[in-house]
Image (cartoon, coloured by chain):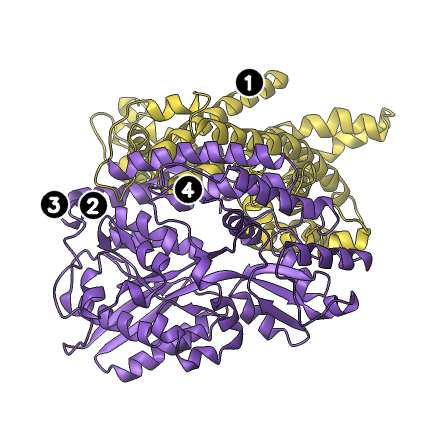
Amino acid sequence: MEPQSAARTGAQPPLPLGPAAGDVKGVPTKGFSPTPYLFMAPYLALFFTFVLIPAVYGLWISLHNWDYLLPGKPFVGLQNYVNLFTPGSTTFGPFWSSMKATGLFTLFSVPLLVVVPLLIALLLNQQFPGRNFFRAVYFAPYVLGVAVVGVLWRFLLDPNQGLINYYLGTSIPWITALPWGWIALVGVTVWWTLGFNAVIYLAGLQDINAELYEAAKVDGANGWQRFLNITLPGLRPVLIFVITTTVLASANVFGQAYLITQGAPGQETRTAIMYIAETGLRQFNMGAASAMSYILALFLMLISVFNFVVLRERED
Amino acid sequence: MVDRRAMGRRLTRQDFLLLSAGAGAGIFVAGCGGGPQNNPGAQGGSGGDGGKAYDGPKVDLAFWNGFTGGDGPYMRDLVEKFNSEHKNINVKMNVQEWADYYTKVPSAVASGQGPDVGIMHTDQLGTNAARSVIVPLDDVAKNLSLKESDFAPVVWKAGIYGDQRYGIPLDMHPLGFYYNKTVMEEAGLDLNKPPTNRDEYESALDELKGKGVEGSWMTPFRFTGGLMFESLLWQFGGDLYNQDGSKALFGSDAGVEAITWMVNLINNGHSPKNIAQDADINAFQNNKNAFNWNGIWAINIFGENKDLDWGVAPLPQIGSEKGAWAGSHNFVVMRQKTPDDNKLQASKVFINWISQNSLEWAKGGQIPARKSVRESGGFEDLKLQSILAEQVPYLNFVPPVPGIGDVETNALDVAVNEAITLKKSPKQALQDGAAKADKLLEENRQKYQG
């Protein structure tokens, strides 16, 4: 949220001040002052170069059959979008099946990534010897890159030669069949990223006033009641943050499926981002890929608005 | 890779970043309109003597390829030898994964940062010629007196796009048949008689099954399930695409027969279900799998494994005729933003030299494309490569139609995957795949002609 809030602050017009305050240095009484804009300039330069201009340009690309190396980039209007909603077009089937893959992954991973880290944070918030060590242990996988995680688990989960099946004494096709593929991808992602959410929760837990717990104890509240009536309400702002970022991060899933299942079986674990990257950067159908990006972005915006509305209502 | 913690807003930013990389290059290319972009034949073409000699000032050549495997060191040695023999040419080789290479090279060329010389597979030549990433090399072929008769005809023809030659074939890499002698011996099979036809193959597998061995593992991925399917398709008398690459033919009866035979190996207990990429070759090296259909490059992989007792043979003939999949590496010259005749000439000298010295390259596990090199005593001494070279008369290649690589990935490989993982019946999988391929071929036809 940081860039947005920065932009919002910067966009505020200078406050009208009384004549008495008028001669305070740096606070203009009237007219135009470049100071705030100069402060914002570095950020705005990056924002325009890497966000706004490409965004608008992407919209333009999505209206063409665009291959940056071909001389002809015919304008096709909304055809790339129409194709995405026309059963039988080359992009319709693969795109929506990739959206479904992303949707399923989000559906399976978000609840786990919201609940499991909370439980771990509650444990790590207790007083016990080696607490800092365990805090580090749970956070450790998060520092690994997706390539490391992908290759590592790709070997561990191999159906015929992997250590997981070896120790379990099973022959489960973890990465080549469903539902195992999803279990593997979600499991790996939870293992990999739960540390981040746990740390956020932990910070939230430490912000809750200890006196509230003492007061509740005096009133005879048991552990479960204290959790429901003090911990959870105290964590609400943290919870909103965790849910929103986790949903969006899960909808971004790419590396795990790309490296571990390669989209198999068939193309059932090929996620939206995987398909968009393939279409745009491997097949060079950048127009179609841009159109898909916009549809995906639209979906994510709707989900974010939904999250915001639902969670805000509860706040009142 | 996508940052796991990226926000939705940043997701779109990321997409735009990816796209803007291409878009920026697009602006650039559009900006130099009238250049080679609009006239693909403008570069390469004439000039110099087509690579016989170079006596100009000293030049540096960037040579990119994807030889990340056991073949890389052999090419590196060749390059070093070339450099020591040519004082005024210094070739610098840069190796990256093929998949990255094929996405990186076009954008590098578009931004003027591309290499001078590169390697491309036959099925990528059409795409890159159409996109003006590479330039025609007719004069190299002409001045070096390279003739169709000195190459396998399919490979030679595969280098042509739109009446111009874009690739100088370096090698052929066919699929071959590998057998694990340790496993065969345990099952009481004759080590000197690896199966050569369907009956022998199936009865050998039955023997192995009697000893509790799943003898022929089927991978549901292109390496090597897809390549095996293509070989079998040709063996059963089918073909991948029609002559001009406008229609997919692999959904034919021949295709169904081929994939059904593969699926039956799983159903009859000769292969585990749902195996992962490379599990077949790993099991082979661990003496758990007896037979493996794999590329000629596997010679190096198995050769390095001193504990492995193995042999290689031409593919068994399962269908009504002989047939085997093969790919081919071709030399290409990249389009330059500012053409440099000296570099162009030096590039041609380099290509010519390597081509003539491709026997060294054969040691890296390849069959030289040049007949003269293939028929030299030196190549006959490479026993294993020579065995697979017996397949040359009936090798088949994916045709060099622009965009064909994507059709293979998104239609054929998916169909094979769905059949081998038993998600769809063989017939259903292939017909769905062929229907998808037809649409993609039509789209490509419009795109690259438009």
> Residue at 14% of width from left, 44% of height from top?
B33
Mark 4, secondary structure of its residue: loop
Q: Position of residue B343 (x, y in %)?
A: 19, 68
Mark 3, secondary structure of its residue: loop
Amino acid beneath label 2:
Val
To the question of a shared chain for discs 3 and 1, the answer is no
Q: Quadrant of residue B73?
A: bottom left
To the question of a shared chain for discs 4 and 1, the answer is no
Tag nearer the camera, 1 or 2:
2
Residue nearer the viewer, B24 or A37:
B24
Q: Is residue A6 left or right of residue B316?
A: left
Label 3 to label 1, Cα distance in Å?
54 Å
Label 2 to label 4, Cα distance in Å?
33 Å
Chain of residue at mark 3? B
Q: Characterize the local packing of mark 2: few (<14), some (14-19) or many (20 or more) Cα atoms within 10 angstroms.
A: many
Chain of residue at mark 1? A
Residue occupied by mark 1: A309
Tag nearer the camera, 3 or 1:
3
Query: Is B83 located above or below residue A219 in the figure?
Result: below
Residue B445's label in the rendered image is none
